[in-house]
Image (cartoon, rainbow, N blue to C red):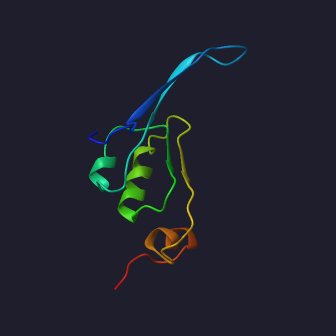
Amino acid sequence: MGVANLLDNVQLRWGGGGDVQAGTAVVAFKAYEKGRAKWQGPTVDGVWFDEEPEQDIYTEGLTRTNNGQRGQFAIITFTPLLGMSDVVMLFQGLDTVRQ
């Protein structure tokens, strides 16, 4: 992706055993700097935001997990250093439209 020593994705494989079937998974890494368009793409099984994203990136990430056919998930972990940002207000149940 143009940055030395940076992973774009990791493919995981696991063996079966007991009631667990063998399978594969792909973990993709995306940066916020490229904006919402970088997050557009196919449906994914999960998304984990490890820093506070802009609201458009957050909603785009949620859209990627919006298939409803599998157990998709979204996790967001961050310290709200930006105060009452649009994303924080989503979790507070507050109106995010700013005048």
| Image spot of residue 97 (x, y percent) | 38, 78
Q: How far from the left and from the top, in percent, is residue 94?
A: 51, 77
The residue sitting at 35% across, 37% down in the picture is 42
The residue drawn where x is 31% and y is 42% is 3
- The image quarter containing residue 20 is top right
Q: Quadrant of the C terminus?
A: bottom left
Picture quarter containing residue 79?
bottom right
Nearer the observer, 98 or 52: 52
**Rendered residue at 30%/56% (across/down):** 35
Which image quarter holds the N terminus? top left
Q: Which is more toward the observer, 4 or 22?
A: 4
Q: Nearer the viewer, residue 67 or 64?
A: 64
* Whole-percent x, y for residue 65 in the image: 45, 44
Above or below, comparing residue 93 to residue 62 in the picture: below
Q: Is residue 58 left or right of residue 48?
A: left
Say above or below: 43 vs 59: above
Residue 22: x %, y % from top left: 58, 15
